[in-house]
Image: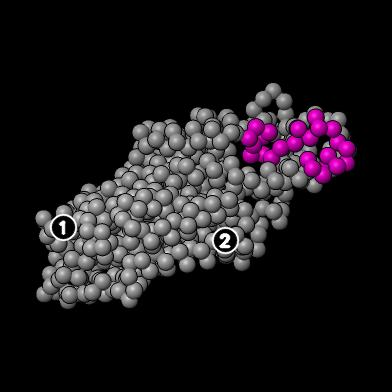
Amino acid sequence: MAEINQDHRRSPSVDEKHYDSGKTSLAPGDESPTRLENGKTDTALLLNEAETMERIRAMPDDATPIFVTFSQHDPDNPREWPKWKKWYITCFASFLNVITCFCAGGYSSAQGDIEEVFGVSGEVATLGLSMYILGFAIGPMMLAPLSEYFGRSPVYIGSWLILFIFQIPLALAPNIGTVIVCRLIQGFGGSAPLTNTGGTVSDVWERNSSGNAMMIYGVSSTFGPPFALILSGWIVLRTNWHWLFWVFMIVTGCLLVLMIISLPETRHSIILERKAKRVRKTLAKEGVSSGTLQNISDVHSKGEKRSLHSLFAVNLTRPIRFLFTEPITMGAAAYNGLIYGIVYLLNEAFPMVFGEGHDFNIAKWGCSFAGICVGVLIAACFYPLQERYYLRRVSANDGKGVPEARMWQARFGAFLLPISLFWFAWTSFPSVHWIVPIIASSLFGAGIYIIILGVLNYVVDSYQTYSASALAGVILIRNLVGAGFPLFASQMYERLGNEWASTLLAFLSLLFVPIPIWWFYRGEQLRLSSPWARCVFQIHWISVGRAQY
């Protein structure tokens, strides 16, 4: 899941915004006009586009700052777009997530041929996968501020162009060094969906009505890697490893064209900035003074759009600060890192269990990952039950979010990981029919889907305004672990054997079973011990007078 709308205030504060009565427009969800104090000594009006022009025309010399916002049912507001359009954007952005994971995991099917052609060891060839995942870790930290400054659409297009272009030198690579460098750059470009897709979902859906959209996004994040191994195995078997990357180029190129044609800007701050510019341009043609026009800005920037330098400074430092000071972020990062580490380690077991043990060729052992895919899809079918439970808890809490309710299913999903890994470990003998460990892997797929989606939703709900920074820290650790674990996966399975190596993973996952249970029952105390999450909690307390946590 990658970012939700970011806020770059320097430190948490309960009293950051003050509202009193005034004759202004309605922001979405407001029930009465508001006048907003902008943090300086003057007072600013919160108006929509039409009301801003009406006021300036009536009072052209008024120096009161005006912050342009959406009106009710504003057609420029992504959350007011037709449902078909919102679902198209959600599914398209999620499919980008599938394809970037496809490009990541698909490399494993070509790794054997790359070792043979370039005469390198398995560890060196594995760097092609590790560098791509390392690019996943670096990319979000760099692309998030660009997304805030330029918008989501330019970042999608620019980064996807990188992923597309660098398929060409990869397909024509004359040596292993070219492969490794191109994979690192591709990982950086392919990380755009990690940065933007979660934010895109939050742009077009209200938080308490985004359950089904988040379900699709969750499927794209967990379904993509195993699905990649199924398809890529057949491509490599029928052609060669060069054609695998030509296929990647064709797919990413088609999506790039479709992206340019059909994917609109959804980031609210960018849309409102454009509305403010449109207002200033229209009024300038009518002869309004430049001094008056300077007082018109969008509600997000409040006339002081931050520089790229300051945005980079916040995006590169705040996630690290969260990792060392926020218990929720630390726990989520550790749990997600463990899960992704286990996923990449388990990937190494499949060619050994099904290739060597059951004499599957590369395409057939790739198909053995279908069990994980099926498990993910089955878990997704049960996700509406989680969403229904969450909405009941929200309704009982005066309409305010209850982050702990996001962990309802994760309490049970946590047990699926050790159960499935123990099952997989001790049914991986050649004498046991191959379908038995595949059934075990389906439970593993269901478990990772339930846990990852639950944990990320819990982080988002706990931090809300600051969730982008918390998620950036979680994703950073997750992908650093994902980049490092494949480098020793083959050695671990060769030395311990299929059974005991997978058993070790089962015991590791067993250690983390209490985390979602603790968060479900004692999450409030955990949030109160997290400085930034406590800030969000206190703001909600003030906003409702007596929050029922």
Asked whether, in this view, residue 244 is left or right of residue 32, the answer is left
Asked whether, in this view, residue 521 is left or right of residue 368, the answer is right
Q: How crowded is mark 2: few (under 14 residues within 10 Å), some or many (20 or more)?
A: some
Q: Where is residue 495 in the image (x, y as percent from the top left)?
A: 11, 55
Report the span colored magenta. 280-305
- Amino acid residing under circle 1: Tyr
Q: Residues within 10 Å of mark 1 (few under 14, many from 20)?
A: some
Q: How many marks?
A: 2
Q: Position of residue 477 (x, y in %)?
A: 34, 44
Q: Residue at x 41, y 50 (%)?
A: 185
Q: Farthest residue in the front direction?
A: 174
Front residue (pair 90, 284):
284
Q: Residue at x 18, y 66 (%)?
A: 352
Front residue (pair 166, 342):
166
Q: Which residue is drawn at 60% across and 59% down?
A: 260
Q: In this view, does 118 lie above or below 517?
A: below
Between the residue at mark 2 and the residue at mark 1, the CA separation in whole angstroms equals: 41 Å
Earlier in the chain: of badge 2 and badge 1, it is 2
Q: Mark 2 points at which residue?
A: 259
- Amino acid residing under circle 2: Met
Q: Name the residue under label 1.
A: 493
Q: Position of residue 212 (x, y in %)?
A: 50, 62
Label 2: state its secondary structure.
helix
